[in-house]
Amino acid sequence: MAIQRTFSIIKPDATERNLTGKINAVFEDAGLRIVAQKRIHMTKDQAGKFYEVHKERPFYDELTTFMSRSPVVVQVLEGEDAVAKHREVMGATNPAEAAEGTVRKLFAGSIGENSVHGSDSEENAAIEIAYFFAGYEIVG
Ligand code: CMP
């Protein structure tokens, strides 16, 4: 297995409840290293561009309103098989279907407010990382 990087967001429902540290502990305990991290407050337009792929979905407006409601923590995580490992510890998109011990099972309240986002492929991770971070901000 190769060392990979993936992109992660700790979402507004989690930052509002002061859960950044607890979520980071789940990631670090899974062997993921936080090699870049910053807290930002996205505009609705920024969130809309990030989630452009979902533009035609019925939940697009709800999603971009939610993602710009409060600050988020954007992160780059590094580790062996990081994309799959991160998705595993986040749990299923719908918290009702998430496995025990996953971030979404532990902390998320609904499919819309599901506490974390993670890239679904190494290719998308590179695109998503570049949307938020300059190369010098990532220190492995
Ligand atoms: P995320 O991994 O950030 O990618 C897209 C997001 O859209 C997803 O997590 C959910 O937060 C949100 N989402 C997906 N399906 C629904 C839905 N049916 N209703 C509301 N939000 C959704």
Image (cartoon, helix red, strand yellow):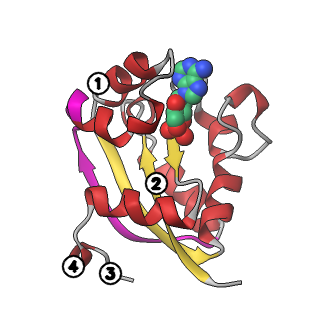
Circle on res. 69: 1
* Numbered range of the magenta stretch: 31-45
* Residue 84 in which image quadrant: bottom right
How far is mark 3 from mark 2, CA to CA?
A: 16 Å
Residue shown at the point (42%, 31%) measured from the top left: 17
How far is mark 1 from mark 3, CA to CA?
A: 29 Å
- Label 1 close to label 3 by CB (< 8 Å): no
Whether residue 1 is visible here, answered yes or no, is yes
Which amino acid does the dot numbered 1 rest on? Arg
Residue shown at the point (29%, 56%) measured from the top left: 131
From this view, report whether residue 137 is shown above or below residue 23. Answer: below
Q: Secondary structure at mark 2?
A: strand
- Label 4 close to label 3 by CB (< 8 Å): no
Circle on res. 8: 2
How far is mark 1 from mark 4, CA to CA?
A: 28 Å
How far is mark 2 from mark 4, CA to CA?
A: 18 Å
- Label 1 close to label 4 by CB (< 8 Å): no
Give how far across and how far down residue 93 sits, in percent: 65, 35
Circle on res. 78: none
Q: Is mark 2 within 8 Å of ligand 1?
A: no
Residue shown at the point (51%, 42%) measured from the top left: 116
* Mark 2 or mark 4, earlier in chain: 2
- Label 1 close to label 2 by CB (< 8 Å): no
* Mark 1 or mark 2, earlier in chain: 2
Q: Is residue 44 magenta?
A: yes
Give the residue at mark 4: 136
Which amino acid does the dot numbered 4 rest on? Tyr
